[in-house]
């Protein structure tokens, strides 16, 4: 192991973490994955995978070993709008994620970690800056005065401050990115924690010829979505730079949820009607603002939304077939 650059991925059983492990292995690193569960859809590429609860500081102490080169902190209590915005899971979301981040920050300093990446979220941005679907403001500098639209966003903002405090006080070499709606194959696609791209792809995949595709809200609320490969590219570029962040890692290709659904229908070659229904939607508009990351890291997405969906939809269709 001493001849290899060594990386640890926390949350390696999740969607982004699983893809990140694969990329790190492709680059020739020795990788340790850790999570409360193994990846759901394909075997991990990690050299070693430890299953345990990252809320337990003793487990975190066993996972993060002395002088590791790179630690990627992606672990947390997360889900789509149906999980985050109902209010029913607020205490768990805040407690679980905060406990993990407190543990990771302390142990990372104790073990003299060389670099630590923390995945924050676009959900930290003020709700009052995202009321117009056509012109939301998610520029990095707009985060304060703080007013996130969910407890998930508040916890992520607190965690940013936590890791930056550890940088100031203990010299932790931290890098922070605010992820904007990452999507792709091997993401959660059913069960209540799936996010909008997977949920809509599933609804279309399951729909018969006469069935309407139901989407929450008016359908005019807007979002941008970033394909997983682009997310990993930007994450590694930030991790191996001299910059700290926080940086937006997302796409500026904003689309209404109604048009998003039409795009999935086009890819599926189906012609079902769309029906809007009441449901949790979060803010009215959200899209990444990439000026800073283009300026500092010369990064921008390679995949269009349609290109990414052409990879996600067939994968979800295959999952739907497996459950029939």
Image (tube, grey):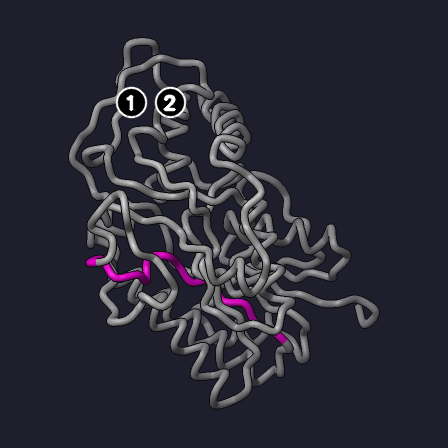
Q: Position of residue 128 (x, y in %)?
A: 19, 58
Q: Is residue 93 at least partly visible in the picture?
A: no
Name the N-terminal-most of marks 2 and 1.
2
What residue would you read off at disc 1? 213
Q: Mark 2 falls on what kind of element?
A: helix
Q: Position of residue 163 (x, y in %)?
A: 45, 77
Residue depicted at x 49% and y 57%: 36
Residue depicted at x 64% and y 77%: 114
Between 292 and 211, the one lying in front of the other is 292
Picture layout, residue 11 above or below residue 207: below
Between 148 and 10, the one lying in front of the other is 148
Q: Is residue 164 at least partly visible in the picture?
A: yes
Residue 134 falls in image quadrant: top left
Q: Residue furthest bottom?
A: 169
Residue 204 circle label: 2
Q: Which residues are magenta?
A: 115-128
Say left or right for 279 vs 323.
left
State the quadrant of the C terminus.
Answer: top left
């Amino acid at each position: 192991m001493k001849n290899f650059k060594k990386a640890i991925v926390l949350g390696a059983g999740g969607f982004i973490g699983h893809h990140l492990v694969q990329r790190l292995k492709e680059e020739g690193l020795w990788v340790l994955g850790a999570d409360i569960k193994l990846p759901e859809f394909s075997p991990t590429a990690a050299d070693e995978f430890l299953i345990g609860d990252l809320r337990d500081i003793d487990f975190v102490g066993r996972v993060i070993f002395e002088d590791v080169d790179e630690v990627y902190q992606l672990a947390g209590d997360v889900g789509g709008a149906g999980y985050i915005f109902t209010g029913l899971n607020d205490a768990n979301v805040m407690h679980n994620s905060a406990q993990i981040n407190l543990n990771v920050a302390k142990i990372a300093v104790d073990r003299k970690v060389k670099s630590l990446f923390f995945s924050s979220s676009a959900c930290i941005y003020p709700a009052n800056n995202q009321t117009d679907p056509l012109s939301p403001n998610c520029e990095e500098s707009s985060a304060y005065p703080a007013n996130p639209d969910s407890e998930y966003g508040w916890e992520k903002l607190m965690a940013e401050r936590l890791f930056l405090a550890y940088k100031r006080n203990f010299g932790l070499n931290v890098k922070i990115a605010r992820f904007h709606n990452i999507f792709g194959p091997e993401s959660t696609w059913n069960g209540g924690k799936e996010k909008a791209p997977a949920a809509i792809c599933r609804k279309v995949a399951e729909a018969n010829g006469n069935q309407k595709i139901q989407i929450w809200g008016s359908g005019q609320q807007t979002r941008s979505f970033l394909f997983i490969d682009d997310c990993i590219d930007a994450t590694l570029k930030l991790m191996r730079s001299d910059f700290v962040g926080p940086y937006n890692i997302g796409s500026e290709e904003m689309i209404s949820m109604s048009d998003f659904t039409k795009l999935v229908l086009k890819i599926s070659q189906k012609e079902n009607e769309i029906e809007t229904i009441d449901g949790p939607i979060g803010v009215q508009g959200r899209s990444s603002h990439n000026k800073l990351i283009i300026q500092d890291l010369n990064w921008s997405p390679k995949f269009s939304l349609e290109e990414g969906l052409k990879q996600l939809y067939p994968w979800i269709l295959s999952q739907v077939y497996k459950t029939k």
